[in-house]
Amino acid sequence: MKSERLWRPAAGERVFQWLVTMMALGVVALIFIIGRELAHGSQPALRRFGWRFLTGAEWDPVSEQFGALPFIFGTVVSSAIALAIAVPPSIGTAVFLTELAPRWLRQALSLFIELLAAVPSVILGLWGIFVMVPWLREYLFPLLRITLGFLPLFQGPIYGVSMLAGGIIIAIMIVPIITSVSREVLRAVPESQREAAYALGATRWEATRIAVLTYAKKGLLGAVILGLGRALGETMAVTMVIGNRPEIAASLFAPGYTLASVVANEFTETPPGIHLEALFELGLVLLGITLLVNALARLLLGTLPGPAVSPS
């Protein structure tokens, strides 16, 4: 009887270990299955275009000429704009919530941030079309052209729908992600770090900058990478405000296109053939960029001291 009581917990532990192991392996297998299907669907395009697909700037289904460079450019630039806009307020809000805000305000503000993260992207896209884009076209873009028009980034005609509009809408979508993760990272900083700084005569700002932010910089970078992963793959909201023009332009006022947007726009209406296979290859390129960013982030995170948040 005693041996039976000892056996049952051991058997249950082995079953539990086997189940969670299978779940973890299932996630890895899913990534490989997605990559395999994309590679299989894009084989004819890979054989026909080769590396020229990544460097070609023409996207013409009629003449069956396909190049991914404008979409890669649009994906990278819109994501970079989004990070430049979203990171400072996101980390600033996280610092305020963890270090400065009173408890009642902390809870209320955290709730609103979580609600913003729950808004569907298509709703933000509709808001972007009918509210944000007209405001940008009438007020912000003319102001930028007047004040910063000497830069190529802020020259040219103003359409409203543009690369900059796409970057702004992505920034709005990734602010809650970066803020939430950064807040958890800052909350994980040991209280002894703050107490030691105060004991040495540091002000609240000095204690936050030296004892908290410096200690948590590895985790904060992980939060930024999580936001970048969302920015690279965002589809609907960006499609509705970026302009969807496959070209490379120096001006941020010009329309653009992203890898996810062109797949969403053209996939359902494309008959079997080289056009469809080129769209599969665009999906493969987007998957490769996402995996590459996460791999580089892991290498970078490994070189920094402090607690980490995995970018994947």
Image (cartoon, rainbow, N blue to C red):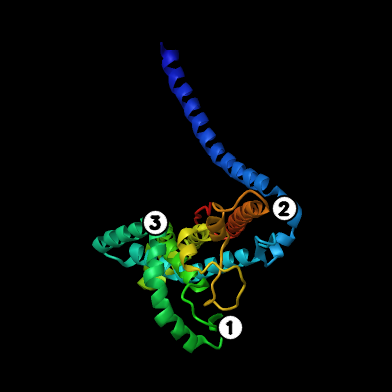
Residue 306: x and y in percent read: 51, 58
Label 3 secondary element: loop
| Mark sitting on residue 120 | 3
Q: Nearer the viewer, residue 291 or 118?
A: 118
- Mark 1 or 2, closer to the camera: 2
Q: Amino acid at mark 2?
A: Leu
- Mark 2 or 3, closer to the camera: 2
Q: Nearer the viewer, residue 119 or 59?
A: 59
| Mark sitting on residue 46 | 2
Q: Earlier in the sequence, mark 2 or mark 3?
A: 2
Q: Earlier in the sequence, mark 3 or mark 1?
A: 3
Q: How much space separates mark 1 and mark 2, taking CA atoms? A: 35 Å
Q: How much space separates mark 2 and mark 3, taking CA atoms? A: 34 Å
Residue 267: x and y in percent read: 56, 53
Count the marks: how many?
Answer: 3
Q: Amino acid at mark 3?
A: Pro
Q: Amino acid at mark 1?
A: Pro
Q: Are marks 3 and 1 in contact (CB under 8 Å)?
A: no
Residue 96, compared with residue 46, is above or below; it is below
| Mark sitting on residue 152 | 1
Q: Residue furthest front?
A: 62
Query: For this view, does 119 lie left or right of residue 141?
Result: left
Residue 296: x and y in percent read: 62, 58
Label 1 secondary element: helix
Is residue 208 shown to the viewer in this render?
no
Q: How much space separates mark 3 and mark 1, taking CA atoms? A: 34 Å
Residue 186: x and y in percent read: 41, 60
- Quarter of the image for the N terminus: give it: top left
Q: Earlier in the sequence, mark 1 or mark 2?
A: 2
Label 2 secondary element: helix
Residue located 50% across and 73% down the image: 164
